[in-house]
Image (cartoon, helix red, strand yellow):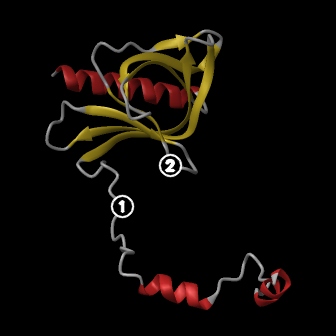
Amino acid sequence: LILEKKKKFKKTKMSETPKESVQEYKNDENVKKIDKVVTMEEDEKVIYEERVKLFRFDTERKEWLERGFGAMKFLQHKDNDKKIRVLMRRDKTLKVCANHYISPLMELKPMDGQDRALLYFTPADFADEEAKKETLAVYFKDVDSKGKFKESFEKAQATIKG
């Protein structure tokens, strides 16, 4: 009986897809076509963008852990120009690795021994979907990029202060 069942199944390569399955998928009424992906950035304008590497300090392990590599943006809300947030997504996965508002109380500090890095503390980063206090280090490709970041960050703080 077992031998008979094995004969009924045809071996297929992983790259081959049975035509019936594809047709069944196309005709499935439960599958919805997505016209537009909502990123929650639609009501914001980009005022700064730079590719950086982001690290966070793990207080338990007492070491720097990489958060990701990708484009860090400062996004200003279109209706309320005093709301400016930092958003960064990892390059390939587009997973959020930084998401917090800029505050006038935040202070950028140089990182010891690194001429291309800056440190700052955020009281509520929502990268993991819940607010967490984080000490972040932003590592830049060159000193000029670091200067542009610092200038944009301080300009954003001045805008928030009014």
Q: Is mark 1 on a helix, strand or loop?
A: loop
* Relative depth, front residue between 77 and 132: 132
In the rendered view, does 20 fall on the left or right side of 41? right
Establish if 60 lies above or below 152: above
Q: Mark 1 points at which residue?
A: 37
Q: Horizontal and vertical percent for residue 19?
A: 60, 90
What distance separates the C-alpha of mark 2 from that of mark 1?
Answer: 13 Å
Q: Name the quadrant containing residue 36.
A: bottom left
In the rendered view, does 149 fall on the left or right side of 65? left
Tell me if mark 1 has few (under 14), some (14-19) or many (20+) residues whose alpha carbon lies within 10 angstroms of its own.
few
Image quarter (top left, top right, bottom left or bottom right) of the N terminus: bottom right
Tell me if mark 2 has few (under 14), some (14-19) or many (20+) residues whose alpha carbon lies within 10 angstroms of its own.
few
Amino acid on which disc 2 is placed: Leu
Q: Name the quadrant containing residue 21.
A: bottom right
In the rendered view, does 67 fall on the left or right side of 43? right
Mark seen at residue 94: 2
Say whether disc 2 or disc 1 marks the residue closer to the N-terminus.
1
Amino acid on which disc 1 is placed: Val
Identified at 30% across, 48% down, the residue is 40
In the rendered view, does 111 fall on the left or right side of 155? right
